[in-house]
Image (spheres, helix red, strand yellow):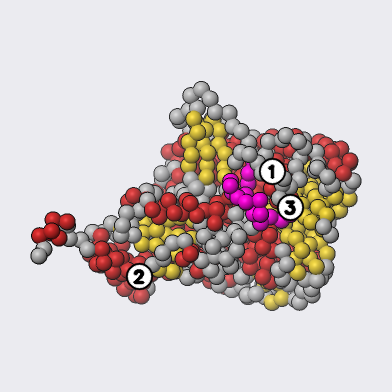
Amino acid sequence: MIPDRHEERLSAKLRDATHRLFGRSLHVRTVDTGSCAVCESEIRLLTAPHYDLHRLGLFFTPSPRHADLLLVTGPAIRAFDRALEKTYDAMPEPKLVVAVGTCPMGGIYQEDEFVHGQLERVLPIDVFVPGCPPSPLALIQGLLVAVGRLAEKVGAEGFTTLDEQEEAP
Amino acid sequence: MTGTSDLLLVSVDVESHVCAMAQTPGVRFADFFGSVEDGQLVIRLVWALDAEHEYRVARWPARGTGYPPLSEVTPAAFVEECEIYEQFGVSPGKGKALNRLVIPPGAEHAFPRLGEAPAREHPLPHASHYVSGDAFEFPFGPVRGVGQESMYLGLVTSGEELIDLYLLQWHKHRGIERRLGGEEVARALFVIERAEGLSAVGNSWAFLRAVEEIAEVTPHPAVDRSRGVALELERLYNHAAAIAALCQSTGLAVGQAQAEIVLEQLLRLNAAVFGHRYLFGVLAPGGTSRAADADALVTSLPPTMDTLRRLVDALWATNSFVDRLESCGIVTPAEAARLGLVGPVARASGQDIDTRRDHAFGPYAEVAVEVPVRATGDVMARMSVMVAEMEESARLALDLAGAGLGAGTVEVPPATGSALGWCESPRGESLLWVDLDGGRIRRARVRPGSVRNWRAFDDAARSRNVFTDIPIIEASFWLTVAGLAR
């Protein structure tokens, strides 16, 4: 299938932004906090020929140490809190969190004894991608928005070295 | 004719009943669960008599300490014994080692359950495993690879060879069955679809069949055919995804890409025919909520199947792929029968069962279903069964569409009573036992095919396999953690 022009434009924007910021290597890690397995299916398709995330300079990584962005699915199950916290903490700064689907937005499960209901209660979220499940195209758009947010984060962080700071008057 | 029969036992008869049933050829253990009725715990045991087209539901009131350890006669019952202990505090005899399933370690006594908490939680997260000599335990998870569900695997290994394996799944327990209590049918359907999203149609059709039986409602045959098309489309995309995962796990990138093209085409076909890539919201109480676009099905499915056939031919001709599949992850026919396996995993291990044929329901009473069976029980056999099932599903979907598809619902009045519903999801027999009170759910037991088939995963993984075979075996089972942990 031939991608439509809207998709082409989105892809071009995403490519430019990640290229500028991350030299064509923004690494994504995924974590499931209690999804129904359908969001995972759409995430896996991001590397399939129809979507091919690699052409955009985005890569999946199994290692949190290499990850710039965390894709999170599910309603944030309480029993998973510690694993989620460890996953997030293991990533270097600056880092992004993209919440995938309706579950982390609180649209499927209300807060109760099993789940937090909203992922925001346990992780700082940069971008929500709605949908049950969000299609791979929606996920690509979500990543584009997230990369824009990363530019803000990188700006806030300050990349001057300690030496330069000491030299400043 | 197909149907269910009820059998009321008194506690003292349970052991002899189970022994008699377990020793009868052709009787398959299907499910085992508790339900609190008028403040009293009632335990139900579901047997499938496939040759006689019947489900037999035995029930007895659990008084006092519990019931005899059924898993000693029927090993398939072990997981359910653990579940009944966790959820209702009733144990199968003193001193029997049980696994923790969905109650996380360190959880308070007040952790929400279906019944009363046991007086004492299991001391260990799992029944003890023998680790000694050169063997050590290698923990893996709960956070796993890209796009994989969370689950903890305890791998007992001496370095390369896998000696033992156990799974911990409380990280994904959403309390689905507990949530369903008190809900109306429409809302419950929404939750059940999302209990195991990759079997949304299979599980929700089983649920609706139970509800419709209680309310004495029959959907229009043309509408039931639409449901059938949705079920076959669900099987098609799941098996395509399994083939993609098999290629990925064997490091065959080209095959994976080809399989993902087929998968994406099938998902787009789902969206074109029913308006949702994963067929959520298609089924409704009393019928379907959307009209199927039969033209889209008839024009798009045959070319996609051609692409699939070219892929499968190329895969069977790729020795490096086939070599990884043969004799990998074997489940013997005896083991499959002993553990009450269902679906493609059972059929690859010589079990000639399929609820669409043996317990024909809805449109399947009108059409003949060919059931592929293989005897070797390895990954190769499972893939071969899936491929054959995809051909059969495509044929069935087109035949059903040819007979005319309808949409719409008949009214399902609020009813009271209980019934068992079943359906052949892509992962095998899906069972839902529903107890309604004036149209609201008193108790719904959700047993997706995944629950039965994960039972054989450790056996398959142990059978002369090495570490790198585990992802291949997992792909060939194509189960979900969501369906297991619920």
Instruction: Tell whether position B430 is magenta.
Output: no
* Mark 1, other Cα within 10 Å: few <14 / some 14–19 / many ≥20: few
Instruction: Tell whether position B106 is magenta.
Output: yes
Q: Nearer the viewer, residue A82 or B32?
A: A82
Left or right: where A22 falls relative to B411: left
The residue carrying mark 3 is B116
The residue carrying mark 2 is A145
Label 1 to label 2, Cα distance in Å? Answer: 50 Å
Task: Assess whether mark 1 and mark 3 are in contact (beta carbons under 8 angstroms).
Answer: no
Closer to viewer: mark 2 or mark 3: 3
Task: Assess whether mark 2 and mark 1 are in contact (beta carbons under 8 angstroms).
Answer: no
Q: Nearer the viewer, residue A132 or A56?
A: A132
Where does residue B205 sit, x and y in percent of width and height?
69, 63
Query: Numbered disc 1: what chain?
Result: B
Residues beneath discs 2 and 3 located on the same chain: no
Label 2 to label 3, Cα distance in Å? Answer: 48 Å
Q: Main secondary structure of the magenta part?
A: loop
Q: Nearer the viewer, residue B328 or A17?
A: A17
